Amino acid sequence: MAVAIAIVVLAALAVALLVGASKRRDRSAAGLSREARSRDRANPVLAAADAAPTGRQVEQAAVVARRGGEVAVVESAPPVPFVASDPQALGVSRRQFFNRSIVGMMGLGLSGFGGASLAFLWPQGVSGFGSKIKVGNLIELLTEIKANNGFLYKPEGRMWITAYPNGSVEKARAQYSSVELAGMAVGVEAGFESGVVALYQKCPHLGCRVPNCVSSQWFECPCHGSQYNRVGEKRGGPAPRGMDRFAMSVTDGVLTVDTGTIVQGPPIGTNTTGQEAEGPHCIGDAGGH
């Protein structure tokens, strides 16, 4: 093992000597040493030889001789005074470049975070479920409800829109809040054919989506058989109350539903319209669970 180490060390020393010798040869081939040049300048014979015309001067003299005259010497323009450049104009070092890049990226990231925070704190133009939705002109909505067999579904608000009869408004005033009555009583107050109700699609029992039944003209939950009349009042099944509904407002005949304000459905036993099933049930008898 020791012999191998010694061989490696000797080989490394040999390589170093070879490299040094090669560099010295290169320097000697490039020209005379400083000491030799100093001795040459002190020698008067060599100094006189240095005073001999250069090759360029000989070429210029030959050109003059061929042309038979002297070469005109054109004076060059006066030198421009040196002005130190601005360090910033010369560029930046690699370290400065990376430092400025890091600071710039940090600033950009903080700006994006700040903008996102402001957008979260002050949401603008929110639409869809959880916001106030302009459903449409009330007369047109009543026409659509009729065209859809008494039930109009609005998926963007997860809601059912149904007509509320004008003849039941007085009973409704004793059961429902003002935000619900704003749509239910608009038929009487504004002279429309009827008012409207905006019902949340979820069953208050276990949250299943409640579809309408065309034959019975009721809402009938397929999960556990809860049944509600056309305005969402409970008529059977295990649900603890009627269908929840949304706050409504009517301005210039346009219905706006606030899907961010959910009002609990009416208690069991509420039946302001007296509507009975108008045909066979879609789910079957809702005896309860």
Image: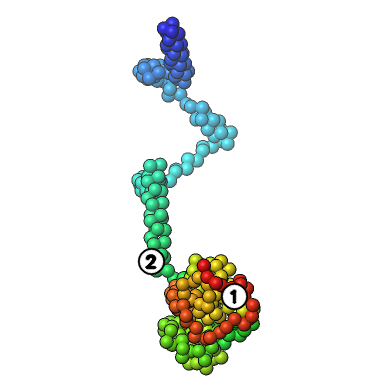
Q: Is residue 158 above or below residue 13?
A: below
- Within 10 angstroms of label 2, few (less than 14), some, or many (20 or more) residues? few
User: Where is residue 169 drawn, in percent x and y?
Assistant: 48, 89
Instruction: State the separation of the CA atoms marked 2 and 1.
Output: 38 Å
Residue placed under numbered mark 2 in the picture: 121
Q: Nearer the viewer, residue 74 or 87?
A: 87
Q: Is residue 281 left or right of residue 262?
A: right
Quadrant location of residue 45?
top left
**Where is the N terminus found, in terms of image quarters?**
top left
In the image as oriented, which residue stretches furthest toward the top?
Answer: 3
Residue placed under numbered mark 1 in the picture: 212
Q: Is residue 138 above or below residue 39?
A: below
User: Where is residue 5 drawn, in percent x and y?
Assistant: 43, 10
Residue type beneath disc 2: Leu
In the image as oriented, which residue stretches furthest toward the front?
Answer: 287
Q: Nearer the viewer, residue 131 or 143?
A: 143
**First in sequence: mark 2 vs mark 1:** 2
Q: How is the image coloured?
A: rainbow
Q: Nearer the viewer, residue 77 or 154?
A: 154
Tell me which residue sits at (41%, 55%) in the image.
Answer: 108
Quadrant location of residue 154?
bottom right
Tell me which residue sits at (50%, 30%) in the image.
Answer: 57
User: Where is residue 225 drawn, in percent x and y?
Assistant: 56, 70
Q: Nearer the viewer, residue 237 or 181?
A: 237
Label 2 SS: helix
Tell me which residue sits at (62%, 82%) in the image.
Answer: 278
User: Where is residue 4 drawn, in percent x and y?
Assistant: 45, 8
Residue type beneath disc 1: Asn
Q: Kindly tell me whether residue 156 is visible in this rendering.
A: no
Tell me which residue sits at (46%, 75%) in the image.
Answer: 241
Q: Kindly tell me whether residue 63 is visible in this rendering.
A: yes
Q: Is residue 221 above or below residue 55?
A: below
